[in-house]
Amino acid sequence: MFRPYNFGPGPAQLPDVVLNKASKELFDWNNSGMSPMELGHRGSDFKKIIEKCLANASELLNLPSTHRLLFMQGGARAQNAIIPMNLLNERRLCDFVVTGYWSEQTAREALKYGITNISASSEGEFVSIPSTSSWLVNKKTSYIHICSNETVHGVEFFEWPNLTSIERENIPLVVDMSSNILSKRMDFTKIGLAYASAQKNIGPAGLTLVIVNEELLQDRSNRGLGICPTVFDYRNLIKTNSLYNTPPTFSIYVAGLMFEWLKEKGGVDEIEKINLEKSKLVYETLDSSDFYQTFVSVKFRSRVNIPFFLPNKQLYNFFIEGAKKRGLINLKGHSAVGGLRANLYNSMPIEGVKELVNWLKEFEINYG
Ligand SMILES: Cc1ncc(COP(=O)(O)O)c(C=O)c1O
């Protein structure tokens, strides 16, 4: 069967080995005579699945013992409401650094629950990250939110902001990692809370990962709004090991297969090397040409999501149609920025990226 290379922003393609294993086990998981979809979420079989999944994810992420990993639903968008409901203190202040479409959306949603302060913004073009020294973070704020990788604009943090340098080291850093979690090694000791939708680097949509420093949740009188639904209350999820209500069992099962796949590939350090090589191949091709344009400052260019542009609008359809004929799909840019975008999640093999590079070169020869 022909399988195209899917360069879409998510849901991403899954490795063939993962799909093959899932399809083999679809009718019978571990001689249970039941599909993973049919296993009761409180039964011993599913317990094995979720525990292994949690253990492998924690190992791959190198989580410190201070932090808990939770499985939730609702995607990253739901976290934009769930985080303020859990983390706002009595002053209800929360700070945001806006570096693109997604952090802007997050700040907007938080307005419903708290008093938001935009500490810094690269609004206008969203092609860089304002230096931490310029951030104006409220002293009494509940948390400061960043998006570690702006999926739409292609801007990525390569180191965490040094909050000590602006005398805000006691303020929890909250990070939307939806598009670059597990794509490279990250230091979670510096993070108060991180969250990510699954459908890019983790597995199928339906599952959301939340990583939280338990210290933040110790004093209920200090943080959290009474209106937070029980099902979204982090303390409740910690207490029930993410099993307060029925979790997305099949998505958790497939995420578990993805974690096994990543471990077999050598873990996050190895995938980071491959991701670096993949993004280098694309950027080198774009940079060596006067035909293609990129706007993000080199220092902040995402290794995962690469937006790029053609010299005139008439060419886009030819590019997308030609790419499709070569089995390279979903290269259209997000409607907020237009143009084209190559999304290189963990499961995009280097062979797919090489095919894309060949097409970029061929297209330039024909239309440049
Ligand atoms: C960085 C980032 N945050 C949030 C979201 C929203 O995720 P979801 O659709 O799972 O709510 C996306 C989706 O593309 C994203 O890339």
Image (cartoon, grey):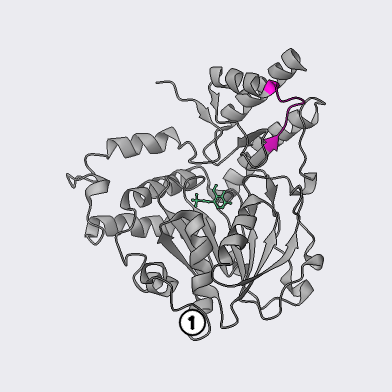
Residue 156 x/y as whole percent: 69, 50
Indicate yes or no whether the magenta region holds residue 311: yes
Q: Secondary structure at mark 1?
A: loop
Residue 34 appears in view: yes
Q: Residue at x 35, y 34 (%)?
A: 20
Residue 65 appears in view: no
Residue 207 x/y as whole percent: 41, 53
Q: Residue at x 52, y 60 (%)?
A: 195
Q: Quadrant of the N terminus?
A: top left
Direction from residue 259 to residue 282 in the image, left or right = right
The one nearer the camera, 76 or 306, is 76
Residue stretch rendered in magenta on the structure? 307-315
Residue 264 x/y as whole percent: 47, 44
Name above or below for residue 337 compared with residue 227.
Answer: above
Direction from residue 105 to residue 86 in the image, left or right = left
The one nearer the camera, 97 or 3, is 97
Indicate yes or no whether the magenta region holds residue 172: no
Q: Residue furthest front?
A: 112
Q: In the rendered image, which quarter is residue 176 located in?
A: bottom right
Name above or below for residue 356 compared with residue 134.
Answer: above
Residue at label 1?
A: 218
**Magenta part, dominant SS:** loop
The one nearer the camera, 69 or 65, is 69
Name above or below for residue 55 compared with residue 305.
Answer: below
